Amino acid sequence: MLLKIDKVQKSYPGGRPVLRDVSLSLEQRQTLALTGESGSGKSTLLNLAAALDCFDGGEITLDGTALSPLDDSGRAALRRQSVSLVFQQFNLIPSLTVDQNLSFHARLADREDKEWTAHLAERLGLSELLGRYPENLSGGQQQRVAIGRAIAARPKLLLADEPTGNLDETASANVLDLMLSLVADTGAALLLVTHSLDIAARLDRRAHLSGGHIE
């Protein structure tokens, strides 16, 4: 089991619970869509799975390592080695070119592979844009850079938070096609937060978060 979320609890500051005994599991090479209403805790759960935040109860095990005993540096090391994230807002580094953004996470994980990065750039339609900066790209182009940057590090787990939320229907379908193809090529597992039932239907499994519980 690559990711195991076991009876996890999380409350917002002030004590309002957002996750109540949430359990979820994901095996290697599996893809899973996490759906739910706005404010249901989908992004919170994704951040916990990425070891970006701490939970209040239960346990999360990632690639055989329990997260609760880890300090900040331990969680950061685990993220570098096992996890990549794609955010709806892209979060590209504005001072880096497309080429530099693509290889950024791989360098942090000490897994930079120029041939693999060049292959990703070609698959993502970015080969002619490598010298540009994010501000000179369209929204769809920035999203493809964000996906390429995440996958360039060859993560075991790819987490994506509404990765097509800012794109039109055609662009969304194209981006999802690329993401699923590249995930299959690398053998990574994918946990994708989405509000789209059409997108969710294309993944192996679906889990729905409501009232702090998985349905």
Image: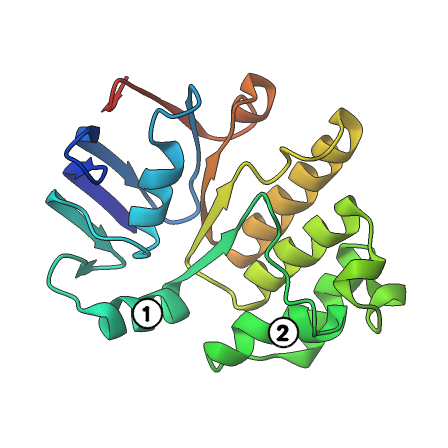
Tag 1 near tag 2, CB within 8 Å: no
Q: Nearer the viewer, residue 135 or 202?
A: 135
Looking at the rendered structure, the kind of residue marked 2 is Ser
Instruction: Check disc 2 and report its element: helix, strand or loop.
Output: helix
Residue 95 on image: x %, y %: 70, 74
Residue 2 on image: x %, y %: 30, 51
Instruction: Check disc 1 and report its element: helix, strand or loop.
Output: helix
Residue 166 on image: x %, y %: 68, 35
Q: Nearer the viewer, residue 31 or 83?
A: 83
Residue carrying label 2: 103
Direction from residue 44 to residue 110 in the image, left or right: right
- The vertical placement of 95 against 165, above or below, is below
Q: Is residue 166 visible?
A: yes
Looking at the rendered structure, the kind of residue marked 1 is Ala
- The vertical placement of 192 against 97, above or below, is above
Residue found at x 69% / y 45%: 178
Mark 1 neighbour class, 10 Å CA radius: few under 14, some 14 to 19, many 20 or more: some
Examine the image and state in which quarter residue 113 appears: bottom right
- The vertical placement of 62 against 196, above or below, is below
* Quadrant housing the C terminus: top left
Mark 2 neighbour class, 10 Å CA radius: few under 14, some 14 to 19, many 20 or more: many
Residue found at x 64% / y 61%: 92
Residue carrying label 1: 76
Examine the image and state in which quarter residue 94 appears: bottom right
